[in-house]
Amino acid sequence: MQLFLDTTDTAVLAELAKTGLVDGVTTNPTLIAKSGRPMLEVIAEICGLVEGPVSAEVAAMDAPTMLEEGRKLAAVATNVVVKVPLTKEGLIATAEFAREGIQTNVTLCFSAAQALLAAKAGATYISPFLGRLDDHGADGMGLIQEIRTIYDNYDFDTEILAASIRTAQHVTQAALLGADCATIPPATFDALFKHPLTDKGLEQFMADWAKTGQSIL
């Protein structure tokens, strides 16, 4: 599974990218607004920090303007993926982007039927929002399973990018169900490294090592 960071904080991204475990980045209008910086400037900086896909979202609601905005975003760097909403206009734009060789991330997916349409339109990625579905009493992980089955039935190339992830357990469950990627906040990325038994075991090892009075160096 590829792990993307859902952030526009370039300082945090630069630090976490040093792990070699960050495969890409996703952004959205909310994150851009929080950055307080010009969007194209932020996207260009992020693209310089990671080699993998960087999702940058259009702001338009109609397909012609989405296409104009998407082409401008795609011109920022070769690893930009144009993010479009899962609407009729968004999928019209997605199909044209596919014809032009521009990668897309179709976002705000909440049903398997929507995911089917996105794949038929030629989306590179589909982003089902797990946490938001769970918040409304639906089964976010069940949606991942439905999309995986449909995509495998018809050999669609569209990759499942699990989004709106809240916990490390969400990442594990999405991986078990066959999601190709997950986009996670930096705090959740950090949580993937941790387990209380790891901390306890390491503490014991270090205490026992200190008793030996040895040094490896």
Image: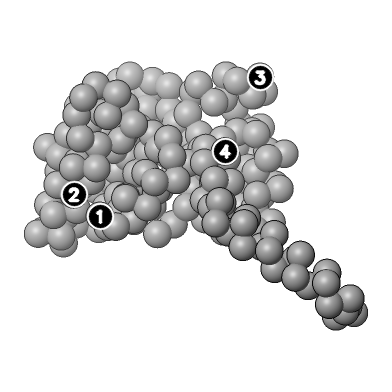
Query: Which type of secondary structure does the marked residue at label 3 adopt?
Result: loop
Q: What residue do we see at 47% from left, 41% from top? A: 184
- Gap between marks 1 and 2, in whole Å? 6 Å
Q: Earlier in the sequence, mark 3 or mark 1?
A: 3
Query: Which type of secondary structure does the marked residue at label 4 adopt?
Result: helix
- Gap between marks 4 and 2, in whole Å? 26 Å
Residue beneath disc 1: 177
Query: Which type of secondary structure does the marked residue at label 2 adopt?
Result: helix
Horizontally, residue 141 falls left or right of residue 97, namely left
Q: Amino acid at mark 3?
A: Gly
Q: Amino acid at mark 1?
A: Leu
Q: Earlier in the sequence, mark 3 or mark 4?
A: 3
Q: Nearer the viewer, mark 3 or mark 4?
A: 4
Q: Nearer the viewer, mark 3 or mark 1?
A: 1
Return the mark for residue 187.
4
- Gap between marks 3 and 4, in whole Å? 21 Å
- Gap between marks 2 and 3, in whole Å? 37 Å
Q: Earlier in the sequence, mark 4 or mark 1?
A: 1
Report if the CB atoms under discs 1 and 2 are less than 8 Å apart.
Answer: yes
- Gap between marks 4 and 1, in whole Å? 23 Å
Q: Quadrant of the C terminus?
A: bottom right
- Gap between marks 3 and 1, in whole Å? 37 Å
The answer to whether 38 is drawn above or below residue 142 in the figure is above
Q: Amino acid at mark 4?
A: Ala
Q: Residues within 10 Å of mark 4 (few under 14, many from 20)?
A: few
Q: Amino acid at mark 2?
A: Gln
Q: Earlier in the sequence, mark 4 or mark 2?
A: 2
Residue beneath disc 2: 145
Q: What residue do we see at 55% from left, 56% from top? A: 197
**Residue 211 coordinates in the image, percent (x, y):** 83, 72
Q: Earlier in the sequence, mark 1 or mark 2?
A: 2
Residue beneath disc 3: 36
